[in-house]
Structure formats: C-alpha cells, structure tokens
Amino acid sequence: MMKLEAIIQPSRFESVKDALREIGVEGMTVTEARGHGRQKGHTEVYRGREYTVDLLPKIKLEMVLPDALVDRVVDTIMKTAKTGKIGDGKIFLSRVEEAIRIRNEERGENAL
Amino acid sequence: MKCAGWKCCFSLVVGTILLAASPLAAQQLPAAAATYSGKSRTLRPEGLSYMVRITNLGMATVAAPAPAEKINEKLEQLEKDVKAAQSAGDNAWMLVSAALVLMMTGPGLALFYGGLVRRKNTLAIMMQSFALMALITVMWALVGYSLCFGGSGPMIGGFEHAFLRGVGAEPNPDYAGTIPQATFMVYQLMFAIITPALITGATAERMKFSGTVLFMMLWFLVVYAPLAHMVWGKGGLLNAALGGKFPTLDFAGGTVVHISSGVSALVCALYMGKRVGYPKQPMPPHSLVLSFIGACLLWVGWFGFNAGSALAASSLATSAFVATHFATAAAALGWSGAEWLKNGRASALGAISGAVAGLVAITPASGFVGPMPALVIGLIAGVVCYLMVTKVKAIFGYDDALDAFGVHGAGGTIGALLTGVFAQQIINPIFGAGKAVGALDGHWGQLGNQLVGVLIAWGFALVGTIIILKIVDAVIGLRVPEEHEVEGLDITQHGEEAYNLET
C-alpha cells in the first residue's frame, strides 16, 4: 500500500477528481490548503498599502492506494493537473504499514 | 410615484368640487395635495392656495352672498389649512431625512468600518457605532439638544430645552418654521450620533470599549455641542444666518461634523500610538463586501444629511440633493483615476473611498452650489483625499487605522474652503436677496470667513480632544493590553466573535 499526497492547482481539481474516478479510485481526502513553492505570490494594494501575498490557495489530495493502482494514479494526476506553469504542485508517495477499516476491522488492502 | 396627466386633472376637479361643497372638506384636501406634490406641480401647496381662493370667492359671490367678515374668516381658515399642508409636506421629508441620517451610522458606517478592520475586530467597531446610537440619543434628550440649540450665546446653547422641555409639535421659527420642533430636534440628533462614530475609524482595533464610551460622552459635550451651536445655533459665533460674528457657510456639517471628527481622529491616532505590528504586519480589510454595502448606504443616507439640511421639502433641498450626488460621482472618479494612474488598476476600495470623500467635501457646500461646482469640488476632494491617505499618512507614519482624518478631516477642510469659493446667491441668498455669497459670486471676504470657521473648528477639536484623552487615559485608560489587541477586541472586549462559521 502506498499513500499518495498531491498538491495541485485549485482550478484543476475537478478534472483530476473525475479522471481518478474513471480509473477506479474509490476514495480520497481533499483539503483546501495554502502554501507556496517556487511560484511567487502577488501584491494587493489597499489605500496605498501594498501587501505581498505569498501563501497561495492550493488543493491537497490524500489517498492510500493498493500497489497495483499507484502508477496509473500518478500518471493520471500528472496528465490532468498539469498546466505547464510554475505552481502546478507536487506528488509525494510514501509506504503505508497498515490500514484498518473501523466498521468491521478489515485490514490491509481489503480495508481500502 | 407616477402621476398620469388624467389622474392629476381628476384630483384637481375632485378637489375643486370638494372645496366648493363644504369648508370641512377643505381641511381634508391638503393631505391629498401633499401626496401628489412630489410629481405634480399643479397640486403644490402654493398653487392650491391660489386655486382655493378663487373657488371660494367665486362660491361666495355667485351662490350665497355673504358679509365680508365671513369671507375673511374663510380666507383665514384656508390660509391655516395651506400652512398645515406645507407643514405636512415638510414634516414628511424631514422625518424621512432623519431616518436616512440614522441609517448612515447603522448600518452604513458600521458596515463600512466593519469590513475595513481585521476579522477579529469586526463586532467591536460595529458595536462602537451602535453604542453611540443609544448613548448620544439619551444624552441628547437630557441636555444635548439644549446645549446645541437652546439659548443664543456665541459659544454654547443653554439649558432652556433640557429634558426636551418645550420641544413638541410647535415649530421653532428660529430654525425651521414649518415643522414641529420635535422633528428638528430628532433630525439634528442623528448628526450628533454619526459625528463621534466617525472618530472610531482612527482608534479602531486597539481602543477599550469602556474608554470609548467615556471618551465619546465627554467629546459630545466638550467638542460637538459648542461647535454645533457656534455654527448652527442662534447667535453662534460662526452662524451665517442668525447673527454670527464670522458668518461661516456650513450647510450640512463640514466644520461641525467632518472637520471636528476628522481632526479629533488625528489627535486620537497620534496620542494612542500605532496598532501592534503596524506598519510591518499586513492588516488588509477582512471584507470589502461589507465595506462596499456600507459605502452605498452612506451615499443614499447622505441625501437625508445634505438635502434634509434645507429643513423643508423645498427647491433648496432638491438643489442640495443634486449637488451631493454629482460631487460624489466626481470624487469616486477622481480617487479611482489617481489610483489607476499610480497602480495601473482601479480598486473597489478606492472607488468607494473616493465616493465617501466626495460626500464629505460637498457637505458644507451642498446648499450653496450648483451641479457644475459640485463636480469640481468632488473631483478635487477625490484626488486630494487619495493623496492624504496614501502619501501623507505614509510620510508622517501615524496610524489612522481606517483613515478618518484622511477622508473626513481633509475632505471636510477642502469642502469648507471651496464652499467659500463656489457659493452662489442664486442658489441660496443667505445674506439677503441680491447679495453675493461666495468668492466667485463677487464676495471674496467669504473666503476669510470660511478660513476662520475652519481654524476655529480645527483648534476646538485639537484642544478639546487632547484634554479629553488625558482625562480618559487617567480614569480608565485608552488602549487594551497588547495580548488583548493581538487576540482581537471582539473576544476580549465583548466576549463574542463575528463569524462562527463552523458551528
């Protein structure tokens, strides 16, 4: 099992979500996040006072996947989340030791 | 209200018949006339009185020849009725105006300021406006009205109307001869409410609620009441119509309301010091949507403020209404244009701030100038207030949090001086028929009078506010502790939050 975390542009979220559903991803956790990487923020001016806003709105997707699905999911996100500009985000993968379904105590990939 | 031609004719005919039928019916007609006077010139009270006389004279001579006394009696009665009709029209407008001016404070100013502060201080700033609606109202009933408009001294009124004694249905001919004095009283009250509320823009996000309440009570008595009496009260030092030494033109409160509050705001900002983190930490407005709604309510409410200051539903009220509207539009364009040139973009906050600056600047001039000077006054105010808020404030570094001085102090001063330039006797012959009023009218001396008025208002606000700040600072303190300021005034001063979106 792998945990996938992806930070993407909010404008791409709907397409990514639809594409993932098509390839059989059954669940995900979505967070409206703010952050920055190499993308520069923007300035706002209120009555002559300038503010640099460097934390930009992003969407963070989290999902734990069976090993067999990982490559396809990564490919799909890469394809659908890409705009080609700085600020498109990143994908992080990490190994997951165990998964447990609280309702019926199923474990491992069955619990996903 | 649309009044189709035939409807007017119909009501004319019906009115004539009714009048002819019985003197009792004549008493009912003025009410109908007042309803239509907004659109239909033929049914204005003046026209009516003429028509009524003809009709009744005709009746008298043709139908039943009566002795001359009886005709005179009837005429007297009719004159009374016509007066009552005019009073009804004026009173209706003045009551609406009073309500409009109250609407400027709550919700107008409360929303305008509420949106400009950070989220954690929203309720606190709104509550300050609302508290003044209650506080000043009670003080007004006890002594406030009397101190402003009782008596005829040069500096301050007296106690003859304390506890609103003698303030009822009878007009006070010194101020407004066609409306009940109680209407005049409640209308002027609304000005006394919004003026101190404007100051809260400078002390925002750091002043104690208890300190604010005491400060405002003292400020109303020490600064507002004397200034209001000096400018508008009978015998006041600066009164232009009722025997002032330096007749200052101030139609709706450029000196009394805006210079007084704006200059006091500057003193407060300097005395209290900057907010924690200013100017390094970003403090952007938390909701320009609220501010936007507030500014639009201010624009609408200001028609009551300026046009209502004619104290009658007269052509002068129309003139002030028109001047107010045009100046506001020009000022919004002026501020936005300056901002566009400087930043390459026109912001919503800039446009609404410009509109407020225009409303402020046209306030003293509204009942003295035509639409073209109004455009000029508005445009100048929009650009100058933009520079005050963006440049001058940055140069001197004072933390006038919501720009009460930059907009009201500066805009009020510009407006008061330009009133002396543009005032015209053709709009308002305040010094007597045919006598020039403003500088361009040929009366250059008026500029001097305006300057004296402005200087006295500045001086009064400066000295009064410093003294009051010292007193309040000593008695209960002005600022909240630093940790309360960081946590926000909503929680620490009022024990509640503006937004509990997750509950």
Image: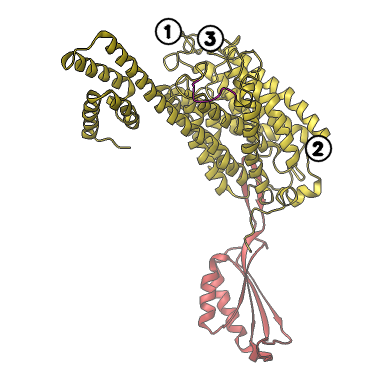
Chain colours: A red, B yellow
Circle 3 SS class: loop
Q: Main secondary structure of the magenta part?
A: loop
Query: For the magenta stretch, what is the residue range?
Result: B165-171
Position of the C terminus of chain B by quadrant:
bottom right
- The answer to whether residue B351 shows anywhere in this view is no
Looking at the rendered structure, whether the residues under marks 3 and 1 are on a common chain is answered as yes
Looking at the rendered image, the disc whose residue lies closer to the viewer, 3 or 2, is 2
Q: Residue furthest left?
A: B62
Question: Of residues B24 and B495, which is closer to you in this image?
Answer: B24
Question: In the image, residue B79 lies at what x, y percent?
Answer: 34, 17
Residue B434, disc? 1
Whether residue B335 is situated above or below residue B123 in the rendered picture: above
Sequence-wise, the earlier of marks 1 and 2 is 1
Looking at the rendered image, the disc whose residue lies closer to the viewer, 3 or 1, is 1
Q: Is B168 within the magenta? A: yes
- The residue to which callout 2 is attached is B476
Q: Is B317 within the magenta? A: no
- The residue to which callout 3 is attached is B444
Q: Quadrant of residue B38?
A: top left
Question: In the image, residue B412 lies at what x, y percent?
Answer: 59, 26
Q: Is residue A9 left or right of residue B51?
A: right
Looking at the rendered image, the disc whose residue lies closer to the viewer, 1 or 2, is 2
Alpha carbons under labels 3 and 2: distance apart:
48 Å
Q: Residue at x 47, y 32 (%)?
A: B95
